[in-house]
Image (tube, rainbow, N blue to C red):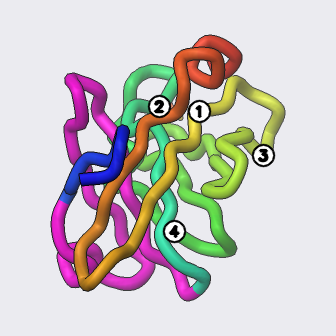
Amino acid sequence: MSAGLHRIGRVDDVPLLEGRSVTVAGRRVAVFRTPHGFHAIDGTCPHLGGPLADGLVADRCVTCPLHGWRFDLRTGAERGGHAGVTVHEVVERDGALWLRLAPDDALRQAA
Ligand code: FES
């Protein structure tokens, strides 16, 4: 395993335009597959804790299933100007998916 990478499953575990929830080092992360590749963001909505992995995916964004906040999967920004979420790195290698949690600095900035 490369430094900081955690194996989270196989590529086929995440269908196109869907999300899956994984827990890495005690942190809940939502992993998504889009036509442009895989993305990972914090799995808990900063509004009232909605499960972002269950949100609708379109235009490289996910919409929280509870109240509709919409997060850009590339930046973690909330499209309506609300608090965003932290983005994590997903690496695809030999049919497997690996995740590297954002550094602590990125986690603090997103808070
Ligand atoms: S909990 Fe996500 S928008 Fe309210």
* Disc 4 packing (10 Å; few <14; some 14–19; many ≥20): many
Mark 3 and mark 1: span between their CA atoms? 11 Å
Mark 4 and mark 3: span between their CA atoms? 14 Å
Mark 1 secondary-structure assignment: loop
Instruction: Verify CB contact (< 8 Å) between mark 4 and mark 1.
Output: no
Give the amino acid at mark 2: Cys
Q: Earlier in the sequence, mark 4 or mark 1?
A: 4
Q: Earlier in the sequence, mark 3 or mark 1?
A: 3
Magenta run includes residue 6: no
Residue found 78% across the figure and 46% down from its top: 79
* Disc 3 packing (10 Å; few <14; some 14–19; many ≥20): some
Counting from the top left corner in percent of width and height, residue 83 is at 69, 24
Residue at the far front: name it.
Answer: 2
Mark 2 secondary-structure assignment: loop
Residue highlighted by disc 2: 45
Between circles 1 and 2, the one closer to the viewer is: 1
Residue highlighted by disc 1: 85
Mark 4 secondary-structure assignment: strand
Mark 4 and mark 2: span between their CA atoms? 15 Å
Between circles 3 and 1, the one closer to the viewer is: 1
Q: Earlier in the sequence, mark 1 or mark 2?
A: 2
Please state the extent of the stretch shown in magenta in the rendering: 9-35
Mark 3 and mark 2: span between their CA atoms? 13 Å
Counting from the top left corner in percent of width and height, residue 19 is at 35, 63
Marker disc for residue 79 = 3
* Left or right relative to 58: residue 4: left
Q: Earlier in the sequence, mark 3 or mark 2?
A: 2
Does ligand 1 reach within 8 Å of label 2's beta carbon?
Answer: yes
Residue highlighted by disc 4: 57
Is the C terminus in the top left, top right, bottom left or bottom right quadrant? Answer: top right
